[in-house]
Image: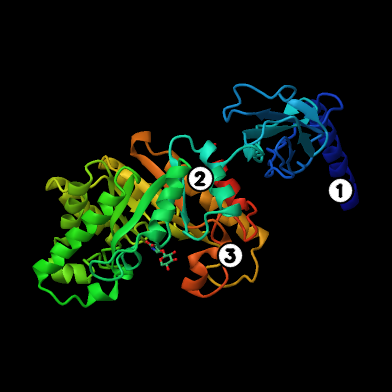
Amino acid sequence: MNDFRFRYLSILLGMLVFITSCSSGGGDSEPEIELGDPIANQASEITSSSFKASWSRLYRAQSYLLDVSSDASFATFLAGYNAKSTTSLNEEITGLESNTVYYYRVKAVKETVISNYSNTVEVTTTFVPDPNQTLKKAADTFLVGVAVQSGKLTGQYDENYTKEFSSITAEWEMKMDVMYPSQGNYNFGPADAIVDYGVANGINVHGHSLIWHNSTPDWVKSFAGTDQEFEDMIEDYITTVVSRYKGKITSWDVVNEALEDGSGSLRNSIYRQKMGDDYIAKCYQFVRASDPDVLIFYNDYNMITDQTKQDAVFTMVDDFIARDIPIDGVGFQMHISHDYPSKDDIQKATDRIVERGLKVHFSELDVRANPNKDLTSLSSERSLSQKAKVKEVVEVYNGIPNENKYALTVWGLKDSESWLLNFYGHMDWPLLFDGNYNKKDAYYGFLEGLQ
Ligand code: XIL
């Protein structure tokens, strides 16, 4: 009896399954499939004219439809790449423009079922520099400067300066300890050599710097006269120097690094002690009285990373503007590192100069590749990181309205002669050319920043 019932139930169940599958199956096709959406991978093998697009295999997909466009909204397509069908998981895209942004995405296909689009991948082809390109030709809206030394103005120095640069700054020859070694006795030889070199070659000369606590001669530090005599001496020095180079140089850093790190308060230099808190304004007035046309800059370091110092500089600048003290521009020295500061911070600080209608000078650019002393030679990875930072700096500078531009000056030509090697006492490669005058990745980063 039990056996009979079990068999009867099994037959009924079997019939039910048969009827159900016939009614919902519609012949022998499978039920509708859910394909899911494919995932496009980052491009690889990127060159100046090609890249490889790829995507992950989607379970059940039989083929893929690939779109490639130079426009993020895919309003137009690269010829042959409007839903190009392929069974492969990658595709070599060729015949592209150098240094150009492209986008790609895929859909997956299984018979008549087509998925949604994958994510969109952005890729930039690499940049191929024109062999005839130079820094100064590429930067057609501002001067490209380099710090030079009076004893290094011939041979390969000369070749590179005249070919690549449109402005020079004396690395140390136009500082007070060199130009004014003792009271009433000037030494203009080295400064003259640099200024004459600039004039003879049609290269702009930036004067750097009249007053700097770090280049104050000892006789000035221990000045014996009264405060008024000190101020008269400074006025006489500024008048003498500025008048000498009037018409030959375009600009002066009048006071350099007058504010303290961290607090932004006035450095207690001999100038402040003798001439009072308003000594900076006085110096700017002395320069203007000697040369009505020369551009007058305030120059300092760490003004991007040290917010307090940055604020203090702009408070001083605003005070000058309010009191009609002459000032034409602000110089950010730009002694920076391959990974610091961020482009955004450089931009924000730069905007504060532009907002005031002043000129911007990135006056002493060098980019440390080895700030943590972890390298014994410049690795290709670090070199590319340095290049990317140089590119960002140049992009920010190039984006300034033309009327606020002046110069972007690099603090030296060759890595092997950078002041930073002595300053930090360990190896680094902070400039655009290596010790053998070869162009580095950083050099090409400069050019790319101008694209
Ligand atoms: C440095 C020069 O590169 C050195 O040759 C010199 O011995 C000292 O000064 N900030 C400045 C520059 O404004 O004048 C400094 O130049 C680097 C820091």
* Quadrant of the displayed image that contains ligand 1: bottom left
Position in image of residue 115 (x %, y %): 69, 32
The one nearer the camera, 1 or 428, is 428
- The answer to whether residue 223 is above or below residue 279 is below
Distance from label 2 to label 1 (Cα)?
A: 98 Å
Distance from label 1 to label 3 (Cα)?
A: 95 Å
Q: Which residue is found at the position 36% from the left and 60% from the top?
A: 301
> Considering the image in quadrants, where does the C terminus appear?
top right
Q: Residue flagged by tag 2: what amino acid is it? A: Phe
The one nearer the camera, 203 or 26, is 203
Q: Which residue is found at the position 24% from the left and 53% from the top?
A: 314
Q: Is mark 2 within 8 Å of ligand 1?
A: no
Position in image of residue 293 (x %, y %): 25, 41
Q: Residue flagged by tag 1: what amino acid is it? A: Phe
Q: Residues within 10 Å of mark 3 (few under 14, many from 20)?
A: some
Distance from label 2 to label 3 (Cα)?
A: 19 Å
Q: Secondary structure at mark 2?
A: loop
The answer to whether one can see residue 64 in this image is yes
Numbered badge on residue 6:
1
Q: Which residue is mark 2?
A: 165
